[in-house]
Amino acid sequence: MKSLLFSISPFIFVVLFALSWATSAYADESFLDCLSLHSKDYSSISKVVYTQNNSSYSSVLESTIRNFRFTAPTTPKPLVIVTPLDVSHIQATIYCSRKHGLQIRTRSGGHDFEGLSYVSEVPFVIVDMVNLRSVDIDVKNRVAWVQSGAVLGELYYKIAATSNTLAFPAGLCPTVGIGGYLSGGGYGILFRKYGLATDNVIDAQLVDVNGRVLDRKSMGEDLFWAIRGGGGGSFGIVVAWKVQLVSVPATMTVFSINKTLEQNATKLVHRWQSVAPKLPDGFYSGVTLTRVNSSQDGKKTILASFHSSFLGGIDELVPLMQERFPELGLVREDCIEMSWIESILYMGQLSNETLDILLDRTFQSPLLSPSFKSKSDYVKKPIPEIAFQGLWSKLFEEEARFASLSFIAYGGIMDE
Ligand SMILES: Cc1cc2nc3c(=O)[nH]c(=O)nc-3n(C[C@H](O)[C@H](O)[C@H](O)COP(=O)(O)OP(=O)(O)OC[C@H]3O[C@@H](n4cnc5c(N)ncnc54)[C@H](O)[C@@H]3O)c2cc1C
Ligand SMILES: *[C@@H]1O[C@H](CO)[C@@H](O)[C@H](O)[C@H]1NC(C)=O
Ligand SMILES: *[C@@H]1O[C@H](CO)[C@@H](O)[C@H](O)[C@H]1NC(C)=O
Ligand SMILES: *[C@@H]1O[C@H](CO)[C@@H](O)[C@H](O)[C@H]1NC(C)=O
Ligand SMILES: *[C@@H]1O[C@H](CO)[C@@H](O)[C@H](O)[C@H]1NC(C)=O
Ligand SMILES: *[C@@H]1O[C@H](CO)[C@@H](O)[C@H](O)[C@H]1NC(C)=O
Ligand SMILES: *[C@@H]1O[C@H](CO)[C@@H](O)[C@H](O)[C@H]1NC(C)=O
């Protein structure tokens, strides 16, 4: 009984509070007044505060909503959006949000699977990092300072513009934000050799709940550990990250091989589970399973798309695959040699684009459906063939017509 009361009363409080906030101009103004009083320079913060009656409010809000499940009119909307230009704007927003009992949602690239960077059930303010997206590369020391509002593509583009043998081990969708990506760990095509992206973070600048600006030394190793993988939005607002760049050969190799059920996909996918995690560290290996209509008879089948990248040339890759995974039947003609940055486009299904696509924050990646639900898990022992057959019949159900499954091999340094 007691615990029931305890769990109900905060809920009632929240609802009342939301109503009073929404109907009272006074509360609205006092939050804005607070921002102006607590900014070093009011004229600058006033240019980056969007209230609900500002004509740009919707376009700023929707600019990085990457999942249309969260664009409905019924999706809770922020009372205010702040797009800080510097740390003092973040500090003022944290101070005033606390003072007025508002929750903060921090948004970098907006790719959160559940929209957590821009949706909340309690009255809230969005701190959108879009204006804090500088990327400063120090080639000599092989490090970079990257602000959270940059997207992966911007970091990649700048690295490639400086060197063709430096890289950063991160993911394939170029519009994913640095802020959320590094906060959650971050896997990508180089992770079997260099670990998660966040393993390559060596310093950070964080604004904490009290508005203090901390670096690695002043936050201490525990907090520094937590912000690298403990999940975004939990420990403060990370403004920037210092990352270690890694070495890649000037020439890499990629391939993609498709097999349907009629081409023994079930056996191959089953076998892949044992082969792929044991490949040398220079390999990235994934397989994506979708339902398609057979090009032969138009009947439903499963397409297993095996895709890999490798830190080396074709001459090294082909014999290795023929030895480790002869059933796949890889031949030279399936392989393409290219630079690391080209492999990012290839693996992200952007082969037909120029590098400029990496700087386009608004384009819709082919990897991303406009409206999606995504879940992940670890497969700790190989799934038996019969279980794959069960999965196929699930994928053949009508409501699964747009579903897909992606397997990504760990192993390499990830086993350590
Ligand atoms: C199409 C697509 C492809 C993806 N590919 C990969 C992949 O290859 N590898 C991989 O590891 N992941 C991948 N992801 C998952 C992605 O890394 C996470 O969803 C990540 O959190 C997105 O970061 P974001 O900044 O774009 O998202 P946001 O929605 O802006 O933020 C995500 C979370 O981090 C918090 N946050 C954002 N910025 C900050 C900040 N500056 N300080 C503190 N907290 C912050 C937010 O509040 C939220 O909780 C992919 C996601 C999508 C949609
Ligand atoms: C909307 O907000 C922006 C940023 O604060 C400001 O520059 C602009 O003048 C506002 N527009 C209106 C119509 O209030
Ligand atoms: C928003 O509209 C309300 C009344 O509808 C007004 O009182 C308030 O000043 C407006 N705020 C801004 C920032 O324009
Ligand atoms: C394999 O199938 C995928 C998805 O249909 C497609 O994008 C890719 O180009 C195909 N690859 C090859 C080598 O045919
Ligand atoms: C499927 O595998 C069997 C052996 O298990 C083999 O005989 C057959 O040629 C394979 N089919 C294709 C299309 O590769
Ligand atoms: C696959 O076939 C079904 C009917 O057999 C059809 O409705 C559907 O549009 C086809 N899908 C594609 C992608 O061609
Ligand atoms: C690349 O292909 C996609 C989809 O097929 C298309 O929308 C896009 O315009 C193409 N881009 C270029 C530069 O040709």
Image (cartoon, grey):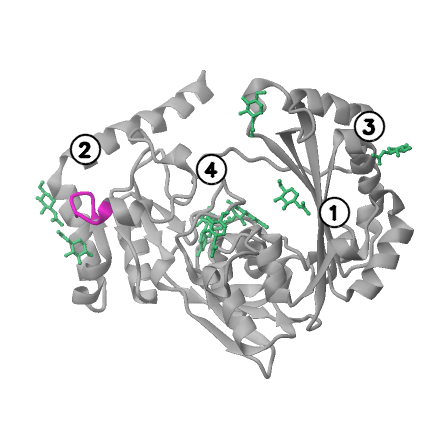
Is residue 189 placed above or below 329 in the rendered structure? below
Q: Are marks 1 and 3 in contact (CB under 8 Å)?
A: no
Q: Position of residue 411 (x, y in %)?
A: 78, 51
- Read off the residue under disc 3: 385
Task: Choose mark 3 or mark 4, whichever is in front.
Answer: 3
Looking at numbered disc 2 in the image, what kind of residue is underneath it?
A: Ser
Residue 378, magenta (yes or no):
no
Give the Cα distance between marks 2 and 1.
51 Å
Tell me if label 4 and label 1 are in contact, CB under 8 Å. Answer: no
Of pointers 1 and 3, the one earlier in the residue sequence: 3
Give the numbered dot on residue 409.
Answer: 1
| Amino acid type, mark 3 | Glu
Q: CA distance from mark 3 to mark 4?
A: 32 Å
Between disc 1 and disc 3, the foreground one is 3
Determine the residue positioned at 81% across, 50% down.
Answer: 330
Q: Magenta residues?
A: 51-57
Q: Quick one: SS at disc 4?
A: loop
Q: Which residue is mark 4?
A: 114
